[in-house]
Image (spheres, rainbow, N blue to C red):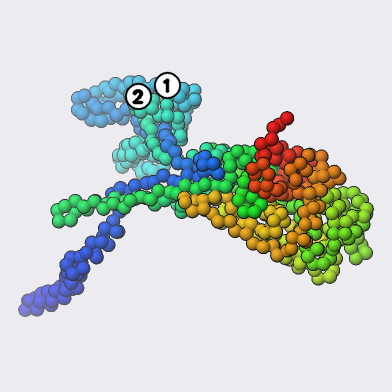
Amino acid sequence: MNLDYPRRLSVLGAIFVLGMVPVLGRLFTIQIADAERWQARACASRRPDRVLTVPRGVIRDARGRALAEDGECFDLVLKSAAWLARLHRCGTCGREVFYRLDTAESKRRCTRCRRRVMIEDGRDLRPIARLLGLAPHDLLQRIEERADRLEERVLHALGDLEGGKRSAYREFLGRDYGWRPVTLMHDVPYEAAREVELHRDRNPALSIVESSRRRFPGGAEFAHLLGRPPDGGGRGSRLEGFLDPLLRGEPGYVWHARDDSEEVVRLVEPVAGVDVHLTIDSDDQRLAMAAIGGGQGALVVVHAETGAVLALASAPSYDPERYADTLRAWPADTKNRDESPLFDRSFASLLVPGSIVKPFTAVAALAAGFAEPSRVIHCARNLVYRGRVIPDRLRCHTSHGDMNLHDAIAQSCNIYFETLLAEMLDRQGYPRFLEVGRAFGLGRATGLEMEAHRRIERLSFAFDGARTADLIGAAIGQGRMLLTPAQVARAYAGLATGRLPALHVVARAGHRPTAPRTEEVGLPAALLEPIREGLRDVARPGGTAARFGLSRWGIACKTGTAQKRTDRIIYNSWMAGFLPAQQGRPPIAFAMVILDTTEGGGDECGPRIARFLQQFYGESQG
């Protein structure tokens, strides 16, 4: 057997040499033959020594005023171990000992030499509490709550350990967790931060962490429009989410390496975020919010020719600087979602539109040849279809008698438009009604940039499988029809100009302006003009909005009252229309809705629109 050892060693040596051949070949390739490529790959794959961050781009209004920007902020942090105890060094043996300030004097002894250790509390919370706007005992309570969590974390981490291991590990965890900073307050005033940093001797457990945080000078008026920037890698919302690739920029990097005994610094320059300018003026947005008042509703005002949004207001709103507090008060699963300030009502809420749809029913009937402006239909309040009376919810609010198209629009006669659509339904003309509705953008995306970051259910204009009453009810905006205020404002812009604009709120991103986009509605001006004239008479004597002095601006408008509940009188009150260019202002189209009211569209929205237009055109309040 001993004679086989040399042979075995030879075989093992041969196997080792054959195994090393590919390894040596690979090393030769990496180090000599293709060294530059592998060195470049190594530099690209290693983590940078330093990241150069850049501020997020600023979102500004039409006049250049900041609505969202990065700002410096100070967070007040606490180190629990430093608060609960002082680190003392024994004067005899040099051992470091932790003792709580409330430790009995008889127990304040070094664990090694048993010499007594003196503990003094020189902390004073009164100056910092005053600058924070808190009572000293309130600040003390907040600190004690954070500090007490240290013991909870230590006990949780110890688990089922017992004996000496538990004691040793407990001391280690107390030091580890105790010196990790815990945030006490976010965004403290500069004066308070300065007090903490200048007087560390008073409160050695407190310190300041400086960081950058997104600020929203636009306030609650722009909260729904701007949304939130991405947080922790998640997707942001509204404009902050949609424009994130432009706003965030690109961070820079610094690598340090050695090449032939020389230190090489590789730098990738950061690219700053792009500033974005909106089409909305802050003053106009505040006027729109004031017009809505303290209730629930929305007001959308757009440039009738270009689709530039001049106001996009939704109420109630919230303070974006206190978003977390609002989110706690109004969780996503709340039963009172309709009242939640987090829910946008201007372009994301699908609502029953009511009578503001009647002009488009008339356009469809004229285009399909089912009506003429001079045609007279008798209104006896109830609709009779195929020899039977349609349910009460489709009846008129009064008996109008004989009505032509012009009077039916001005006085908002339900029976007139329901009769037209019932005839179209019987004579296979209903698809034409759907085509005209879509041509004016009903049931279609408006083009707003924020729509890319939301999902609207039932965004359709098809009424598949609907009952006869719902199909006919679409003539007056009832039944299964659901629209957003932004869609309605866009539709009236198309009615005013004959071209349907794509709505947009971004005027320019950096140096790139947003080009207006429009499309033909496919209807001649001669067909639309009788509808426009009827809408102008809504604000004249005899019309449903005659009492509010709107006619002096040459307004063409339509009121609407959509019944929301059948058990009691609750409405969604609407007003929509358009105005010509005047007093330095462009031609505009608008849509307003006030939710959960007991008044009709004219009585509820008419005075609000009058106040808004008076201020919008800079007229005196006298």
Q: Which residue is mark 2?
A: 199
Helix, strand or loop at mark 2: loop
Q: Which residue is mark 1?
A: 127
Tell me if I can see residue 609 in this picture: yes
Seen from this angle, which residue lies furthest front? 583
In the rendering, at what x and y percent does residue 514 appear? 54, 54
In the rendering, at what x and y percent does residue 542 appear? 86, 45
Which residue lies at the image location 35% right of the left edge and 20% below the top edge?
Answer: 122
* Residue density around tag 2, few if under 14, some if 14–19, many if 20 or more, within 10 Å: some
Q: Amino acid at mark 1?
A: Pro
- The front one of 6 and 264 is 264
Question: Which part of the image, by quadrant, shows the N terminus?
Answer: bottom left
Which residue lies at the image location 81% right of the left edge and 63% below the top edge?
Answer: 365
Give the Cα separation between the discs numbered 2 and 1.
Answer: 10 Å
Classify residue 316 by image quadrant: top right
Q: Amino acid at mark 2?
A: His
Say left or right for 360 vs 201: right
Which residue lies at the image location 30% right of the left edge and 48% below the top edge?
Answer: 50
Helix, strand or loop at mark 1: helix
* Residue density around tag 1, few if under 14, some if 14–19, many if 20 or more, within 10 Å: some
- The front one of 433 and 469 is 433
- Circles 2, 1 touching at the beta carbon (< 8 Å): yes
